[in-house]
Image (spheres, rainbow, N blue to C red):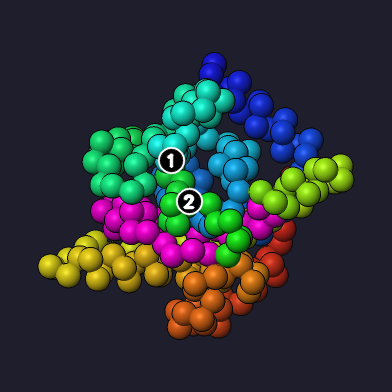
Amino acid sequence: MRYLLAWIFVNFIFRVLSRVTVYGAERIPQGTNFMAVSNHVGRLDAGLVYYLLNRRDIIMLVAEKYRYHWWSRVLVWAVDGIYIDRFNADLNALREVFRRLKQGGVMVVAPEGTRSKSGALQEGRDGASFIAARSGLTIMPGGLVGTQDGEVVARLRKFKRLEIELRIGPAFILPPLEGRDRAEQLKAYTDEMMCRIAVLLPPEMRGLYADHPRTAELLAEQGNVTDLKPIRYR
């Protein structure tokens, strides 16, 4: 019941306040578990996940700071989110993540670990790549545009609906970690993950990964994701 009420609330908000366009929706796996990774630019990002994915087994990591606001505690409780300490090794949170993944859940995470105030990609942290390499999950990268907090406030003040775009790239998998140089492997895996997100964003939002050699390679390989057939949610 609590999840249903949260789902109704989130759907009402997005249907009334936004127009959402998804490019590459046909790439999303159906009936299986996977990891979704994307940039993080606004407070609406988490809600968008529940609006677009019609699943009850979403595994959502939530920053520890949201324990201290009553409204966020209620929402996290309703969707059964997992609080995580972003600045220290949170083994309890990781154990719970892997427990739920074994049950077939869908992991949704922003590798940056926090919202980007500028809207441009920040340096990725290694937590998401560690979970991906350890679990062997298929990874679905996404690039999100239009949920920046400042833009949301500006449009709503003018009584304009939000124009949100989600661009979904090709699936990929990270190999298991091997040997003793795991820190270097994780850094390389994180860069791969972030570059795959970067190519799905407008150039001005690629941030630290705009000039990364891997970003250039992926752009040449994948072309423009907006050439894919869009699906619009109104």
Compared to 155, does 121 lie above or below? below
Residue 187 in percent (x, y) is at 31, 68
Q: Which quarter of the rendering shows the N terminus? A: top right
Q: Is residue 7 left or right of residue 215?
A: right
Residue that mark 2 sits on: 114
Compared to 225, does 212 lie above or below? below
Judged from the image, the secondary structure of the residue bearing numbered disc 2 is: loop
The numbered dot on residue 63 is 1
Residue 33 in percent (x, y) is at 41, 45
Q: Which quarter of the rendering shows the C terminus? A: top right
Mark 2 and mark 1 in contact (Cβ < 8 Å)? yes
Per the rendered image, the range of residues in magenta is 121-148
Q: Which amino acid does label 2 sit on?
A: Thr
Residue 142 at least partly seen: yes
Q: In this view, does 171 lie to the left or right of 226?
A: left
The CA distance from mark 1 to mark 2 is 8 Å
Residue 24 at least partly seen: no
Camera-nearest residue between 144 and 71: 71
Find out whether residue 3 is within the magenta segment.
Answer: no
Q: Residue at x 66, y 48 (%)?
A: 149
